[in-house]
Amino acid sequence: MGENMFQSTEIGIDLGTANILVYSKNKGIILNEPSVVAVDTTTKAVLAIGTDAKNMIGKTPGKIVAVRPMKDGVIADYDMTTDLLKHIMKKAGKKIGMTFRKPNVVVCTPSGSTAVERRAISDAVKNCGAKNVHLIEEPVAAAIGADLPVDEPVANVVVDIGGGTTEVAIISFGGVVSCHSIRIGGDQLDEDIASFVRKKYNLLIGERTAEQVKMEIGFALIEHVPETMEIRGRDLVTGLPKTIRLQSNEIQHAMRESLLHILEAIRATLEDCPPELSGDIVDRGVVLTGGGSLLNGMKEWLTEEIVVPVHLAANPLESVAIGTGRSLDVIDKLQKAIK
């Protein structure tokens, strides 16, 4: 026990476009908040963060804006991201009681991010009171969190459909063998729905409404029993509020193009796969993680299209955060193995 006293805590942070999750080794997921900040534009003061701020999106007076400082999985607004992180580290610190020691932090970055973007992330975390910051690639984190044997020389294929990006990677022996990252994710699907409703029904809807439509009656490109849903928005012709009924088939059609891009990224990654690993993929298949993999019928549709087994991770929303927190062990194990 004595030596444990001074060991610093390790926490993993999944800095997502839509949600920020914090994982600590002994307590699991200790924090899960939308990555949204509400700011007073005159004083630059942060008024709300996370869930409270998300509820304000699209409903604030002029001088208050609710923004997402992470766009496409990378930092779009550095100062706001730092504010958001400070708040999150403080909240997480209370939960695991780290008052006097600085934690070691592992943060995951999208595999397509540039050196500058990575530097911004590690600086932002350092400024919030971390002792050491390790960066790990997001697909590797997702694979660890989905309990795949990342440290063995077998092919693990991960499809991580997040809010801002979709990352497809083949991971073997602790590293990425081939990978494709596209900036299409859950947010893009919401935008597709909103712009479809605007074009077809002359109705303006907000991003939260679009997201609800996607979750309730959004289907991947499979045959299904049609469902309907009522939504409300502003009629562009009269300028008055209006309610309409949407069919799941139209929504499916609206999302079609973005879904095909995701499929294309999966195919492209599998095409880059070394032939030795292709055999593994036929047996072991592909694992889906990230919030986008919860779209109705996603698993069935991909199974039909790529003809290898498709599995859904146990908790797709959390697997990147869990993997980030656990990754230090895996990295240690790998380095030992190499020695």
Image (tube, rainbow, N blue to C red):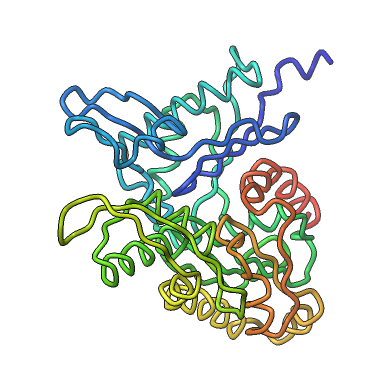
Tell me the quarter of the picture where residue 56 sits.
top left
Expressed as whole percent of the image width and height from the top left, the position of residue 210 reads 40, 56
Q: Which residue is drawn at 28% across and 30% down?
A: 39
| Quadrant of image for the C terminus | bottom right
Tell me the quarter of the picture where residue 307 sits.
bottom right
Query: Left or right of 143: which side holds 133?
Result: left
Q: Residue at x 56, y 73 (%)?
A: 226
| Nearer to me, 236 or 65 | 236
Expressed as whole percent of the image width and height from the top left, the position of residue 308 reads 73, 81
Against 113, is 96 above or below? above
Expressed as whole percent of the image width and height from the top left, the position of residue 148 reads 77, 60
| Nearer to me, 245 or 32 | 245
Query: Left or right of 279: which side holds 75?
Result: left
Expressed as whole percent of the image width and height from the top left, the position of residue 261 reads 46, 77
Query: Left or right of 44: which side holds 69?
Result: right
Against 12, is 313 above or below? below
**Figure disc tally:** 0
Q: Residue furthest right?
A: 1
Query: Left or right of 332: which side holds 215?
Result: left
Against 248, is 71 above or below? above
Q: Residue at x 45, y 54 (%)?
A: 211
Against 301, is 58 above or below? above
| Nearer to me, 263 or 304 | 304
| Quadrant of image for the N terminus | top right
Q: Residue at x 61, y 59 (%)?
A: 294
| Nearer to me, 333 or 275 | 275
